[in-house]
Amino acid sequence: MTMLVLAGCSEADTHQIKNLAMPDRASAQGPYTYELWKWAWVAAMATGIIVWGLIFYAVVKFRRRSDDEVPRQTRYNLPLEVFYTIAPVLMCVVFFFHTVRVQDEMTKMVPDPDLTIEVMGQQWTWTFNHGIGEQNTDATGEPAANGEPADFAYDEYVYTSGTARDIPTLVLPVDETIQFNLHSPDVIHSFGVPAFLTKLDVIPGRVNKLQVTPTVEGTYAGKCYELCGVSHSRMLFNVEVVSQADYEAYLADLAEQGNTSQLPVLGGSFVNEQAGLDANSEGHSE
Ligand SMILES: [Cu+2]
């Protein structure tokens, strides 16, 4: 049956079906998401087959056989009622357990990532700030606010930014654990790369952190996953996972183009000045 369905499809379709519509996993975190997705389908299909089987059985076995036949009337079936209450609850518990397990894996933070990249999502493009030199893994990634100085992992950055016309490219070294510190100067965005099978919201006024380890060199698509305004659909970026040597050459390239900065380019201090976002402020009235 599966073969019959697959025979009518192109090779790309077949690949999609085998992947259950998921992209190929290009990060160390990806397989966790994929396994959860796959087994959720298995559980749903098993439940579906049992339910369809019982429906079909009841329809055939208890069909009316003559015009004046009245079926036997029954009320209450305690064992059945107990079963169909407990079974769905048990299923939810199992789903919940595995969801939390995978979620813990996706949000896991090692204290010493190989590098930290400051990402800024704004209406409607991205800026990627790559650190130069020694990384301070104790840095919080918080921009300057409330009299506190900025606390970034590096003393120097090179950056690349998209424009309304051109989408930016995020270049990453392969097999390195990369921490993304996510900043927004305006509204909520969401930073995600489908091939990494992970994403995280980008929220103004706080620094969300996501660690990903790309495992396969190649070119991928990235996008904003949160409806953030009229040009949300154009808030795309490319991802290129390259060797360590190519990554260093890329950083040198950016420096040569003059895209250098002492502080990561994050869309200004506005990040921390919006009313209601700062726990210590009452908010402004403008
Ligand atoms: Cu967005």
Image: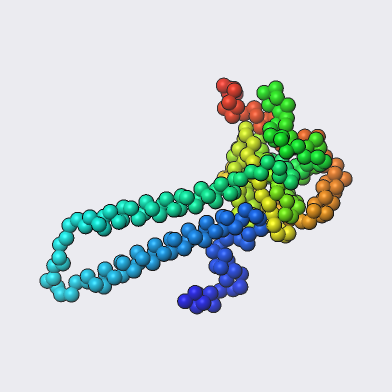
Provide residue 227's location: percent of width, then percent of height: 57, 45
Q: Identify the colour scheme used.
A: rainbow
Q: Residue at x 68, y 52 (%)?
A: 213
Q: Residue at x 71, y 44 (%)?
A: 113
Q: Looking at this view, is 235 or 142 the one in front? A: 142
| Residue at figure coordinates x 39%, y 64% from the top left | 48
Q: Taking 148 as reference, is 197 left or right? A: left
Pick out the residue farthest to the right: 256
Q: Residue furthest toward the left?
A: 68
Q: Is residue 79 above or below residue 125?
A: below
In the rendered image, is residue 121 in sight? no
Report x, y in % for residue 274.
62, 28
Residue 185, x across and y down, in percent: 66, 35
Residue shown at 70%/47% (left/top)?
Answer: 178
Q: Quadrant of the C terminus?
A: top right
Q: Is residue 82 visible?
A: yes
Give residue 220's quadrant in the image: bottom right
Residue 29 spot, x, y in % from top left:
62, 53
Does residue 17 appear to the left or right of 174 in the view shown?
A: left
Is 35 situated above or below 146? below
Q: Nearer the viewer, residue 236 or 199?
A: 199
Total residue callouts: 0
